Image (tube, rainbow, N blue to C red):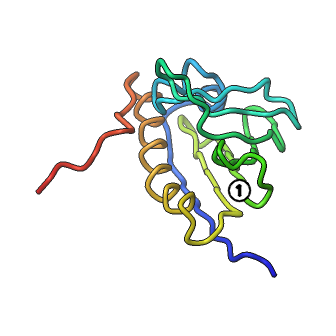
Amino acid sequence: MTKETTSFVYVTYIRSTPEKVFEAITKPDIARRYWGHENISDWNPGSKWEHVRANDQRSVELVGKVIEISPPTRLVISWANASQASDPSAYSRVTFETEEYEDMVRLTVTHDELAAGSGMANGIKKGWPVVLASLKSLLETGHGLDVFAEPKSA
């Protein structure tokens, strides 16, 4: 019996270069400025990566492996909650692809192999749009967004 899966595709255009976008995803000191987390790895195929909260606790929230890497155009990683690291069925896959468009970059993020209706799938729907908007803001203005902001009450 196979599990039902879902996927999420987000495309944004950033006034930047593929190299700077790729660095923002893979360099911990840049990722913390727009994501509030650091992506930590040696970025070699098969290597582990960890998504570490950029605060005093430094909790590892997500884990995975580098599946494929071709800087600055493509990065594919596996992705799971750290608490489910030992469960192979808990992993999904994220693909980052960059393509030059004159003086900007088209960044496509595909998060697939997600268990349909899971907490992770629901979190992805809310998380990726604000993280990628913050990435765009940081690279274009020098300031990321508050990715932990809550909606104002009516």
> In this rendering, would 111 be left or right of 132?
right
Residue lying at the far left of the rendered structure: 154
Residue 29 placed where, x, y %? 56, 18
> Crowding at label 1, few (<14), some or many (≥20) Cα neighbours within 10 Å?
many
What amino acid type is highlighted by mark number 1? Ser
* Quarter residue 77 falls in: top right
* Quarter residue 42 falls in: top right
Residue 98 placed where, x, y %? 66, 42
Q: Which residue is labeled 1 in the image? A: 92
Instruction: Give 34 or 62, whichever is nearer the viewer.
Output: 62
Residue under the point 59% across and 29% down: 52
Instruction: Give 19 or 45, whichever is nearer the viewer.
Output: 45
Residue 119 placed where, x, y %? 53, 61
Residue lying at the far right of the rendered structure: 46
Q: Secondary structure at mark 1?
A: strand
> In this rendering, would 88 be left or right of 102?
right
Against 101, residue 119 (above or below) is below
Against 91, residue 40 (above or below) is above
Q: For the C terminus, which image quadrant? A: bottom left
> In this rendering, would 42 be left or right of 142?
right
Residue lying at the far bottom of the rendered structure: 1
> In this rendering, would 92 be left or right of 56?
right
Residue under the point 81% across and 37% down: 69
Residue under the point 59% across and 43% down: 101
Residue 24 placed where, x, y %? 58, 28
Q: For the N terminus, which image quadrant? A: bottom right
